[in-house]
Amino acid sequence: MTAHSKAGVPTAADGPGTPPDATLVRLPDGKEIACPNVEEALSLWHELADGSPLTGLAREVEPGDTVVDVGAHIGLSSLRIADLMAPGARIIACEPAALPHACLHRNLHRHAPGALALDVGLGREPGTRSLHYHPFVSSNSTFYADDRDEEHNRRAYFQNSGADEASCAAISTLQQVRRPVTVEVTTLTELARRHSIDRIGLLKIDVERAELDVLDGVAPALWPRVRRVVVDVHDIEGRASAVGARLKDLGFRVRRGQTPLYAGGSVYTLAATRE
């Protein structure tokens, strides 16, 4: 297993092997990836393949742009973006949880050479934080545990996917297992400084109720260099409208949608482009 980076420093591009606790799975597009859970990986891949707003924005990324993938997990969004963006753009993917990060590093090295995998989360300020890590559904790991919201979205997902009651009960039990782990956090402003980012062609945020923290970590002077944003928002107490209003005030045109699998749940996707 390749050693992790510290403080958001890129891991060495030395051909990492498959992490010992990971499983290999071949995606429908032919890529073999490492993941903590096969069913979760395939479900996430299908969400991206089924008309996600991310795909349209990825095609607009230009040579010289940097894509920042916040909450990159095992790298499925980064791999999708890499397939669609213009040659000459680069990807910086951030994932603070150890096993997903190890899978991310391996997957980007194999399928998106030149992309950086950083074992760091993004937030309001640099430091360390306690992450609620879900070992069986690692994409649900979060700084903000919310049992009510998680149950709400599970019910919507199960109903829309047509899963049977026994499967729903088993999956619910696994999804509720979590443990605290301490991870490193920085801000997008510091990340841009450290990695000499001139222009962010696409900022992708999927951080399970910590989306406002990421936005709060962007200095006013950096926002004009951000061209496109796609952010998954948990619409708790009007958060989707608040995030949309903030992006509009910053000069973005904002579209709001919801993945069919989460219809009736709290998760919405906001896609924002510069006017």
Image: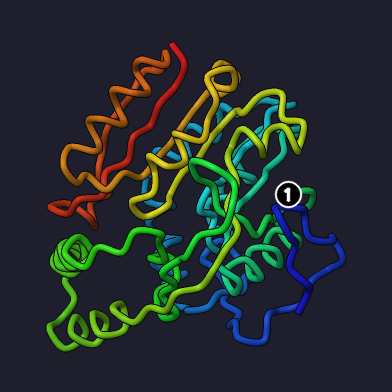
Give left or right: position of 3 versus 36.
Answer: right
Amino acid type of the residue that numbered disc 1 sits on in the rendered structure: Ala
- Image coordinates for residue 222, horizontal then vertical, percent: 59, 22
Q: In what element is the residue under mark 1? A: loop
Q: Residue at x 62, y 37 (%)?
A: 67
- The residue pinned by badge 1 equals 115
Give left or right: position of 49 versus 197.
Answer: left
Q: Residues within 10 Å of mark 1 (few under 14, many from 20)?
A: many
Among the 4 quarters of the image, the one containing residue 230: top left
Here the colouring is rainbow
Give left or right: position of 186 versus 157.
Answer: right
Among the 4 quarters of the image, the one containing residue 54: top left
Among the 4 quarters of the image, the one containing residue 162: bottom left
Identify whether 87 is placed above or below 181: above
- Image coordinates for residue 226, horizontal then vertical, percent: 56, 24
For the residue pair 211 and 264, the one nearer the viewer reads as 211
For the residue pair 105 and 128, the one nearer the viewer reads as 128
For the residue pair 101 and 132, the one nearer the viewer reads as 132
Q: Residue at x 28, y 22 (%)?
A: 245
The count of marks equals: 1
Give left or right: position of 34 versus 73.
Answer: right
- Image coordinates for residue 140, horizontal then vertical, percent: 38, 65
Q: Residue at x 44, y 72 (%)?
A: 133
Identify whether 27 is placed above or below 126: below
